Amino acid sequence: MAERIYIFDTTLRDGEQAPGYSMNLEEKIRMARQLERLGVDIIEAGFAISSPGDFESVEAIAAAVEKPVVASLARALKKDIDAAWNAVKKAKHPRIHVFLATSDLHLEYKLKMSREEAIRRIRENVSYAKSLCDDIEFSCEDASRTDLEYLALAIETAIESGATTVNLPDTVGYSTPTEIAAMVGYVKTHVKNIDKAVISMHNHNDLGLAVANTLAGIEAGARQVECTVCGIGERAGNAALEEIVMALKTRGDKFGFYTNIVTEEISRSARLLSSTTGVKINPSKAIVGDNAFAHESGIHQHGMMANSLTYEIMTPESVGVVKTNLVLGKHSGQHAFSKKMQELGYNLSKEREDALFAEFKKTCDRKKNITDRDLIALVEALENPETQTWALDSFVVNSGNRMTSTACISLKKNNEKIYQEVASGTGPVYASLRCVEKIIKHPFSLEEYQLTAVTEDRDALGEVFVKISDQSGVYRGRGVSTDVIEASILACLNAVNKMLNEDSKAIGTSQSAVQMSFENDMLMGHTDKKGVDR
């Protein structure tokens, strides 16, 4: 009979601390709710002690989801454990995740600690965490480079002290599948109380082996895997959730395991991550890349027409790539529009659906054919009215190769008063953003600008991602329009509204997060301001 593998998602902790992937409070909650729809068993919501913003986000996620276990990471320090517990204690299913490095390399050079002292700290702090919460996970940081006999002692101590899950991370992505299998096998045969805990894997992808190592760990006896959507994370990232899940599902004949993941939500989860962070998915990314189910070769196309199994080992629909015959256009009514959005996986509120339908109708007047990709771009770029301080009213831009570009922009504040400014610049986008800056009277710098076409047509929607910064942090924005200048202005306003929103400022980004205050610097798990690597 097939055994269940528990999916521990750390997109909002290990993944979110990677450069370019930081999220504000609203974005984290939205991602957490999608992870719940995806069916993950455990959400690692953050590292509560790292900053007031991280504490707030862990606490908010704990309140926002019901089905998954919500975990917060904590070093083997009582103050970390207190922060983690206070952040997750209102969750329906709380977990405290304590970690301490166990390899001689880390003990000697990072922690300046003897093996005996590390065992004492494991016993004291796991016991303390257990006094607060029933569900305790303990991680041996750098387990894959830890002496096996000592690793077994550390794990045995953690279980004796109350840990119900023990994690064996390949923190630096150094190991091979055979080495991972040997480590798990040793733990299973040399830790006398291992039957009282679940073995977990957390593999990094520095050598591109994270998924292979995770599958090897499962075959050797691990029953929890720690992973992220699209494999995001420190350095080269983590094991990719979608690859692990679909490998187990597609090759059930080999592995004989199952997960509770709703695989039809995989594509949507990846799209949400990309649209939230502004980081594009590699077209060749397994499972969720645009080319994952594309067939250009004539031989492949002929085989696909004869039998899709010739070149597809899984169907697009199995991971949520929806193909429907419902075509929308300027004559479509809101009922058909609502049905289409449900088919694409969006359950919108009446207010949000009305706003989106209005944008859809405007787009129909400019664009002949509306594709699913257009609709997805529109819905994911639509700003929440509650956080929209500034909105575009009108714009006029003059530009050419023999003149200085000028822009005249009118913005509406809080859907009431209209403000107008004129500015010039070296190009139409620069001039437009200078207008916005003059109107809002809040200086900012443009850190990044990306322009892509949603589809390949001449009348394709232009999708713009921007990153702007002020003294408090960095903020992302997204805009969509058939006019690339309008898309640029909308993206800028989207970022500006986040910048001016107090909640966004409270969370900030990895650049603005409050640096951790340490009572004992020797226990710092990573030099990053915001997070820790395991």
Image: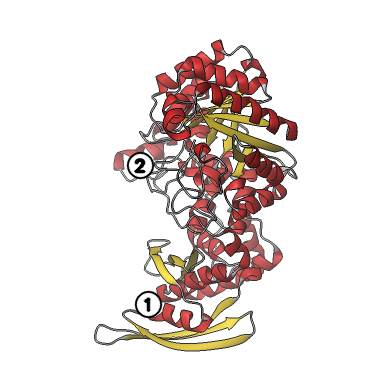
Which of the two marks, 2 or 1, is nearer to us in this view?
1
Instruction: Give the vertical position of 390 relative to 154 (above or below).
Output: below
Q: CA distance from mark 2 to mark 1?
A: 45 Å
Read off the residue under disc 2.
Answer: 301
Q: Is residue 175 left or right of residue 401?
A: right
Instruction: Give the vertical position of 348 relative to 174 (above or below).
Output: below
Q: Position of residue 122 (x, y in %)?
A: 60, 27
Q: Position of residue 427 (x, y in %)?
A: 33, 79
> Residue type at mark 2?
Gln
Q: How many marks?
A: 2
- Residue at (56% x, 62% y) in the render: 379
Instruction: Give the vertical position of 174 relative to 434 (above or below).
Output: above
Residue sitting farthest toward the left: 402
Read off the residue under disc 1.
Answer: 430
Viewer-proximal residue among 453 and 324: 453
Q: Position of residue 156 (x, y in %)?
A: 60, 18
- Residue at (39% x, 35% y) in the render: 311
Closer to the chain start, of discs 2 and 1, is 2
Instruction: Give the vertical position of 352 relative to 192 (above or below).
Output: below
> Residue type at mark 1?
Tyr
Instruction: Give neighbour class at mark 1: few <14, some 14-19, many 20+ (Cα, 10 Å).
Output: some
Q: Secondary structure at mark 2?
A: helix
Q: Position of residue 21 (x, y in %)?
A: 48, 52
Instruction: Give neighbour class at mark 2: few <14, some 14-19, many 20+ (Cα, 10 Å).
Output: some
Q: Quadrant of residue 91?
A: top right
Name the colour scheme: secondary structure
Q: Is residue 523 visible?
A: yes
Q: Is residue 185 visible?
A: no
Q: Secondary structure at mark 1?
A: helix
Viewer-proximal residue among 285 and 175: 175
Q: Quadrant of the N terminus?
A: top right
- Residue at (63% x, 25% y) in the render: 123
